[in-house]
Each structure stands twice: as structure tokens, then as C-alpha cells.
Image (cartoon, coloured by chain):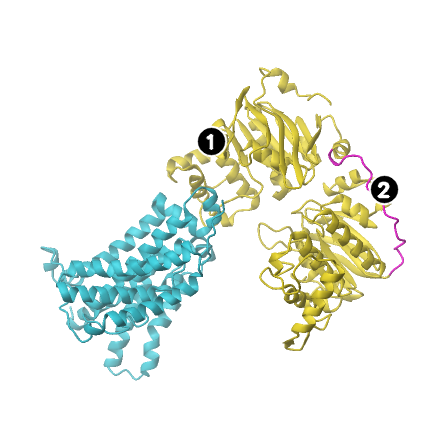
Chain colours: A cyan, B yellow
């Protein structure tokens, strides 16, 4: 197999993975009826914390854990403000993003310009040694495998488990759920924290693998892409994975295209990933019934428990 | 008081399944239930009959454990029980189908039922749902999403959910208010089948024909008191209506001779399709209101009143411009603002959120509907001082109790806000005023003031259309009265020529014979 092609595929995977993490977390959050616009901020917090821990301890495990916890911590602030104090989810989410950008820049001041070896690839005996397939599928780091596992897990959880049914019910109508005796606030807290943890992992992947270093505002809008992916994927995990890889794939391919000197203005090329992803996801999600079945009807609304 | 005439009561072992004795419940300012007795027997369909506000809902909520009674006791199969919560009621074997369902639109039938029953949405439950639905003729596809179902099908979900719990007593709160006639007859077949199998059914309604078809006992409530027990099959709809409404003749006003004015508002074949499952379609409405007239439309809520108001106000435009004529001009395709400019003002039923913005002040709310007719602004600008002056004028003329024009609409009591809203429209000197439930939830003093203001407006030459559920209000204030039932208007009759009981029949969709229209 052509070496360039192989490298391209591998970079596509690294480009898509942080999106998968951030978006699948937000998908669960939104399915519970909460709109957290702070994904970008949580990603950055995850990125800077995991890089700092990696730099100081050298342990990849601790670094990943730090990213996860940092995302969760920011999400818990959001959850407390919006769920317990019923502040506006939109305004609080935007504030969380701004807060995350500022906080990560402050924490990361001394880390700028330091390099990190990156996460080790897992070596699976025999499988990783297969020609082509071994390198393509079985020589990634633990976070790439984790991203696929988490999409499968979320998909199973939402569609097959009772807890997932309860979560969807809360997202559809919190009043009806409350009337049935479901603890709406508790379900939403857990979903929001899960979303924060996932965004933190996405950030960790950025600073540990994608570009193993810390730079201010290094997520460069990926949190917003993740938010858009959730909507355009009609809140379905499978489509979300497709969308993330489509976006990652085209953003890498257009870079190669620019490098090859294709005679198209670079601005147009840079637009391509956004345009294609939106177009493809909109086209495959035109079915109104699918939207009605999957869109959380009470998204963004504050829940005021009565009695 | 007549004895209950029920063959089933005598064939059973004599002990009623449920007996409620001397149930009383008071709310601040009103006695909702005044020492009511009720006996239900297994295998019987018992009707609880009464007008809106007669205390039916309060009584069944006490039986289902949603409300606590102030006094009285409940016996279950002869044993005294204390039903403190719906869980206790379900434990005993009481199930209730509510008028407003709490279902999750995006989930499917199976998932909705599983959530309500604390069981898993698995194949076993799907099998049980199919079994129950085929056995009782309640066709239901467990895998369909709820959003795609009709109201009747949604109700079936609730009924199946109740039946899966094997209840001994099934309470149905106005189950047919949202159903089509075909769905009603299906429901009745199911209920009769359930009663034959020994279930007790308590059926709450004010539709007389239905009760005569379905029920074998009836308890009739009026103003919180039990006024009679009757065998509905032995009574006529007319005699039931007179029991339900009482036989007092409402206070008659000296009626104005008001057939001479020009026609200001005319509906000609006005139709409005239903937008979704919850809507009532309006079908071929004909109506004329002349200057100086007050015309009343009676009817039970949910028969198209909201839709009619939207069609008249211009919130929903009509397909045919000629379907609605205002002072001789076809305005069916015009929007609300334009109709208002031309003299058609409306007072919708819902005060907060529809007639007024809760978070805005009274003067801002005054501006919202009156800015054109009272010139409260110049082109793109608003005039705060003129709005304030107009709001103050409303407050003084209609004696609205509040701190002043700067008070928030949400801070006013219901009656005061209603006076303000009605006053805001009346002081714009409309040619035609449409008011929906003008005194709903309003205390007697405010209601009197509102009625006087409306009559005064008509005396000044405006046409007033009053949509109300309160028959006394309509009989006292209107010259002509008709009823809206399932999106259709009945014939209109002079108030002098019609009795309250006859209006009750019109509300149930019946036509009067022998009365001049």
C-alpha cells in the first residue's frame, strides 16, 4: 500500500478522534435536554491539564485522567448554575467557553513551547504485525480505541438500556418525566458531567497526540464543530461518528490538496470540510420522523420542579 | 332522593366495591365538594355528571389519592381505607385515565408504557401489550412513535397502561372530549366489555347522550353538591340536563331591541383545518353579528373555541377572504394587526401569555394592542408617556387594583388583570369585540363590572361576540345564543325563546326541534 495514502488515513483518524469524544459527550448531554455550549472551554481545560500532568509526571494514564477530570470540573460548574440555580443554559454555556479559554491560557503559560513524546501506540501481539491492516487498524493509542468503544457504548445505552430510556424521557418532556417520579435534575447532572468528561478527553487527545504540545486556544473551534455535528447527526451516535470522520477526512485531504498545489483558492479549500459535513449530514437526515424521534424536545429549557 | 336503580348492584354480594361517604373539600373561597356520597359496584358503569366546576374532578382526585379530603371516608370492599397517594390507589386496584395525557412524544408506545410501569421495554412487555390490545379491541402498534399517533390512539396507550395493571376500578376523566365519533364508539365497546368482565368503571362526563348510551348508574353533581342519582337509560337527555343545570331561571335583563343595526361581523362558510392532533377543525361556520348585539357561543372547552378565536383575531389566516367580513369588507386573509386597525379587537381566553405579556408592565401591554387605534407611537417610535396615560385611563375607568401603569402584568390578580385586558380593548372603541371566557376565574364583583362594560359597548353600537362556557353569563348578557360542538356551530336562538336545558342540548351537538331559530 502506498505509504502516503497510509499516512493520510492515519492522520485522518487523529483528526477525527477529538471530535468524536467532544461530540458524543455533548450528544448525551443534549439527549437529556441540556444544551451545554461550553464544549470548547471544557476541551481546552482538558487539553492544558492533561499536558501539564504529562509534562510533570511523564505518565500517560495520569495525563488522560487529568484531562477527563478537568472537563468534568468545568461541567460541574455549568451543571450547578443551570440545573440547581436555573440560570440560562445558553448564556452559561457561552460563559463557560470564555472561562475555559482564559483559564487554560493562564494555566498553560509556562507550558508553551515544550514538546511531549506523545502517547505510545498499543502493540497488540500478532494483530499489529499484520501487513497494512496491522498498521491501519491495530497500532493506535488507547484513546482512539476508546473513542470507538464509547460511541458503541452510548449507542447501546441510549437504545437498549432502561437508564438510557429514562434519559431520553427526561430530554423529551421533563414535566411528564417528573410526573412519573423520575429525578430529572439528577439525570441531567449525570449527563452533563459525562459530557464534560468526554470533552476533557477530546482536549487531552489534542495536546497529547494530535499536536503533542500546548498552545493557547489550540482547540481552534473544534468544540463548536462538535456541537454542530450533534445537531446535524440528528442526535444519533452512528451518524455522529460518520460526521466526525467526514470532517476529519476532508480537513486532512484539503491540506494535502493545497500542498499538491491544486489551483483552487486556499480559502475555498478550507471551507470544504465544513460545507461537505453539513451537506452530507443534512441530506441523510432529511427524514422528519427521524428528527421527531431523536431530537430532545425540551432542550435548553430550565426545569423548575413543582411540589 | 331517588334510590340508585342498578340491576348489577342487587345481583352482586351487596357490598359496593367502593363507597365514598360524606366527602367534603373546600378551597379558599369555594366549597368544591359538599358532603358527597358515591357507591360503585363491580361490573357497573357509573356516570359522574355535572357542569364545569360542579366538583367532579375534585371528587375523583380524592378517590385517586391526588387530593386529600377535608372530611368523609372511603370504604374499599366494605373496609375503611386511607388513600394518601396515587400509589396507594394503584395498590388497591384503582386506575385512572386522565383528560390530559403525560406521554413522551419522541418515544414509542412500548417505551412510554414501560416508563409508566417501572418495567423494562422488552419483548415480554410488547407481548403483553399486544395481548391486551387485541383482547379489548384497542389496536396499538407497540413500536410506533407517539408523535405520529392521533389523540384517540394516545388515549389507548393510557388505557392499555391502566389495563396492564389489572385494576378493579377504572376512572375515566372526560375521555371523549378529544375523540372523534368513531373513536368514541370504539371506546364504548371496550368499556362495556370491561364492565362485563366485572370491572367497575367511573365515567366522568357532561355529554348526556354518551352517558345514556354507556352508563347504568349516574350521580349528578351541581355546585359541589350531589343533587340526584338516576338511571340514565330511563331518563331522557332533557331530564338529565335539567338535573345537571338546575331549574332556576337565570336573571333576565331587559333585552334591547337589537335586530336593526347593520351587520358588522359575518362568518360565511368559515372553515379552518386542524394543524395537528390536538387541534379541532372548524367546519363551515355561519354567523352574523349586528351593531348593538351581543351574541353568545356556548360550548365545552376543546370544541374549537381556541381555533375560532384565532380565526377571528387573525392569528391564523383563512384561505378565503370572504369567509370573514368585517363592516362589509372581506378580511379573511388579513393578519391580526390589520384587522385590529379596521376595528376588530379580541380578548383571548388565556390572560397571561396570550392576552398579556407577564413580564411587561401594564403600560407596555397597553401599547401592544392599542398602539395603532390609540396612536401610542409614531411610525417606528413608541410613546411611553401616551402609553402610560392610556394605561392609567384603563386603570381608573375599570377600577383595576394595582400600583400603577408600571406594575408588571404578572403581579396582578386574575380578576384585575382581566378587567385591565377587557378595558384595554373596550377603550379602543372597537367596531367588533370578540371576547373568550371574559370572566373565567374572576370573582363576582369583577365579573359584574366586565359584563356591564360589555353591554355598554354594545349599546354604543359595537357588535360583541362572547365565547363562554358559563351558561348563566351568556343567558344574562346575550341576545342570541348558539353553541360550538366539535368545530361546528349550532343554530342561533333568541335568549327569550330558549331554556338553559336546551342550550345544554345544543352544547352536546343536538338540534332543537320546535324552536324558532
The residue that mark 1 highlights is B165
Q: Tag 2, which chain?
A: B
Q: Tag 1, which chain?
A: B
Q: Residue at x 55, y 19 (%)?
A: B78
Q: Residue at x 59, y 50 (%)?
A: B278
Q: Residue at x 55, y 46 (%)?
A: B150
Q: Secondary structure at mark 2?
A: loop
- Work out whether A138 lies above or below B251: below
Label 1: how many residues lie within 10 Å, few (<14), some (14-19) or many (20+)? some
Residue nearest the viewer, comparing A79 with B208: A79
Question: Looking at the image, can residue B371 be seen?
Answer: no
Q: Residue B100: which disc?
A: none
* Mark 1 in CB contact with mark 2 (< 8 angstroms): no
Q: CA distance from mark 1 to mark 2?
A: 50 Å
Residue nearest the viewer, comparing B418 with B286: B418
Label 2: how many residues lie within 10 Å, few (<14), some (14-19) or many (20+)? few
Q: Secondary structure at mark 1?
A: loop
Q: Earlier in the sequence, mark 1 or mark 2?
A: 1
The residue that mark 2 highlights is B515
Residue B377 picture location, percent across and down? 68, 75
Q: Is residue B14 left or right of residue A66?
A: right
Q: Is residue B103 left or right of residue B459?
A: left
In the rendered image, the quadrant that contains the N terminus of chain B is top right
- Work out whether B179 lies above or below B355: above
Which quarter of the figure has residue B428?
bottom right
Q: Please give the range of residues in magenta.
A: B244-261
Residue nearest the viewer, comparing B499 with A124: B499
B247 part of magenta stretch: yes
Amino acid at each position: 500500500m502506498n505509504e502516503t495514502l497510509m499516512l493520510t488515513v492515519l492522520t485522518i483518524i487523529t483528526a477525527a478522534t477529538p471530535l468524536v469524544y467532544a461530540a458524543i459527550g455533548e450528544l448525551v448531554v443534549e439527549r437529556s435536554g441540556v444544551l451545554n455550549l461550553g464544549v470548547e472551554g471544557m476541551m481546552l481545560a482538558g487539553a492544558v491539564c492533561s499536558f501539564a500532568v504529562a509534562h510533570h509526571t511523564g505518565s500517560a494514564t495520569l495525563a488522560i485522567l487529568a484531562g477527563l477530570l478537568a472537563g468534568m470540573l468545568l461541567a460541574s460548574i455549568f451543571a450547578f448554575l443551570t440545573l440547581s440555580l436555573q440560570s440560562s443554559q445558553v448564556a452559561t454555556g457561552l460563559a463557560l467557553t470564555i472561562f475555559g479559554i482564559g483559564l487554560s491560557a493562564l494555566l498553560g503559560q509556562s507550558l508553551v513551547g515544550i514538546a511531549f513524546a506523545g502517547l505510545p501506540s498499543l502493540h497488540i501481539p500478532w494483530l499489529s504485525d499484520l501487513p497494512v491492516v496491522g498498521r491501519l487498524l491495530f497500532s493506535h493509542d488507547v484513546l482512539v480505541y476508546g473513542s470507538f468503544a464509547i460511541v458503541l457504548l452510548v449507542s447501546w445505552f441510549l437504545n437498549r438500556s432502561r437508564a438510557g430510556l429514562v434519559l431520553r424521557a427526561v430530554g423529551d418532556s421533563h414535566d411528564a418525566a417528573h410526573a412519573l417520579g423520575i429525578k430529572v435534575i439528577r439525570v441531567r447532572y449525570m449527563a452533563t458531567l459525562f459530557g464534560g468528561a468526554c470533552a476533557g478527553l477530546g482536549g487531552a487527545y489534542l495536546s497529547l497526540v494530535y499536536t503533542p504540545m500546548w498552545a493557547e486556544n489550540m482547540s481552534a473551534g473544534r468544540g463548536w464543530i462538535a456541537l454542530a455535528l450533534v445537531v446535524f447527526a440528528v442526535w444519533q451516535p452512528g451518524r455522529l461518528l460518520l460526521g466526525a470522520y467526514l470532517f476529519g477526512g476532508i480537513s486532512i485531504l484539503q491540506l494535502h490538496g493545497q500542498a499538491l498545489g491544486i489551483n483552487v483558492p486556499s480559502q475555498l479549500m478550507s471551507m470544504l470540510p465544513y460545507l461537505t459535513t453539513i451537506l452530507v449530514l443534512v441530506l441523510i437526515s432529511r427524514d422528519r420522523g427521524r428528527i421527531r424521534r431523536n431530537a430532545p424536545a425540551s432542550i435548553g429549557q430550565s426545569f423548575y420542579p413543582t411540589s | 332522593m331517588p334510590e340508585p336503580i342498578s340491576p348489577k348492584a342487587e345481583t352482586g354480594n351487596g357490598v359496593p366495591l367502593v363507597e365514598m361517604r360524606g366527602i367534603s373539600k373546600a378551597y379558599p373561597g369555594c366549597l368544591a365538594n359538599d358532603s358527597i356520597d358515591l357507591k360503585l359496584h363491580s361490573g357497573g358503569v357509573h356516570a359522574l355528571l355535572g357542569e364545569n366546576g360542579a366538583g367532579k374532578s375534585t371528587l375523583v382526585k380524592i378517590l385517586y389519592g391526588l387530593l386529600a379530603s377535608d372530611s368523609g371516608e372511603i370504604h374499599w370492599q366494605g373496609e375503611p381505607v386511607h388513600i394518601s397517594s396515587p400509589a396507594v390507589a394503584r395498590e388497591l386496584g384503582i386506575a385512572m385515565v386522565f383528560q390530559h395525557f403525560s406521554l413522551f412524544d419522541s418515544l414509542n408506545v412500548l417505551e412510554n408504557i414501560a416508563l409508566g410501569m417501572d418495567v423494562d421495554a422488552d419483548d415480554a412487555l410488547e407481548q403483553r401489550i399486544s395481548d391486551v390490545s387485541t383482547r379489548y379491541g384497542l389496536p396499538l402498534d407497540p413500536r410506533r412513535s407517539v408523535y405520529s399517533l392521533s389523540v384517540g390512539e394516545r388515549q389507548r396507550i393510557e388505557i392499555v397502561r391502566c389495563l396492564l395493571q389489572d385494576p378493579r376500578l377504572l376512572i375515566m376523566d372526560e375521555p371523549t372530549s378529544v375523540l372523534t365519533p368513531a373513536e368514541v364508539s370504539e371506546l364504548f365497546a371496550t368499556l362495556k366489555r370491561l364492565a362485563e368482565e366485572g370491572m367497575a368503571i367511573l365515567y366522568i362526563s357532561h355529554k348526556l347522550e354518551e352517558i345514556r348510551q354507556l352508563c347504568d348508574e349516574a350521580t349528578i353533581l351541581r355546585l359541589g353538591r350531589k343533587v340526584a342519582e338516576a338511571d340514565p337509560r330511563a331518563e331522557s337527555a332533557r331530564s338529565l340536563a335539567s338535573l345537571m343545570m338546575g331549574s332556576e331561571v337565570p336573571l333576565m335583563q331587559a333585552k334591547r331591541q337589537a335586530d336593526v343595526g347593520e351587520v358588522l361581523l359575518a362568518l360565511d362558510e368559515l372553515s379552518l383545518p386542524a394543524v395537528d392532533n390536538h387541534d379541532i377543525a372548524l367546519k363551515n361556520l355561519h354567523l352574523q353579528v349586528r351593531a348593538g348585539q351581543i351574541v353568545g357561543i356556548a360550548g365545552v372547552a376543546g370544541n374549537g373555541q381556541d381555533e375560532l378565536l384565532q380565526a377571528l383575531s387573525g392569528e391564523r389566516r383563512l384561505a378565503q377572504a370572504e369567509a370573514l367580513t368585517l363592516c362589509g369588507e372581506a378580511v379573511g386573509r388579513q393578519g391580526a394587526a390589520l384587522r385590529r386597525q379596521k376595528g376588530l379587537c379580541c380578548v383571548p381566553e388565556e390572560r397571561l401569555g396570550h392576552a398579556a405579556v407577564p413580564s411587561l408592565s401594564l403600560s407596555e401591554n397597553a401599547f401592544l394592542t392599542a398602539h395603532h387605534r390609540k396612536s401610542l407611537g409614531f411610525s417606528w417610535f413608541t410613546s411611553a408617556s401616551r402609553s402610560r396615560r392610556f394605561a392609567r385611563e384603563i386603570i381608573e375607568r375599570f377600577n383595576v387594583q394595582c400600583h400603577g401603569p408600571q406594575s408588571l402584568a404578572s403581579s396582578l390578580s386574575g380578576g384585575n388583570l382581566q378587567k385591565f385586558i377587557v378595558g384595554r380593548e373596550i377603550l379602543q372603541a372597537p367596531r367588533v369585540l370578540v371576547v373568550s371566557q371574559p370572566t373565567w376565574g374572576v370573582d363576582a364583583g369583577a365579573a359584574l363590572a366586565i359584563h356591564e362594560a360589555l353591554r355598554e359597548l354594545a349599546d354604543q353600537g359595537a357588535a360583541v361576540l362572547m365565547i363562554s362556557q358559563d351558561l348563566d353569563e351568556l343567558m344574562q348578557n346575550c341576545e342570541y345564543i348558539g353553541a360550538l360542538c366539535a368545530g361546528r356551530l349550532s343554530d342561533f336562538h333568541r335568549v327569550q325563546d330558549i331554556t338553559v336545558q336546551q342550550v345544554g342540548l345544543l352544547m352536546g351537538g343536538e338540534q332543537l326541534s320546535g324552536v324558532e331559530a
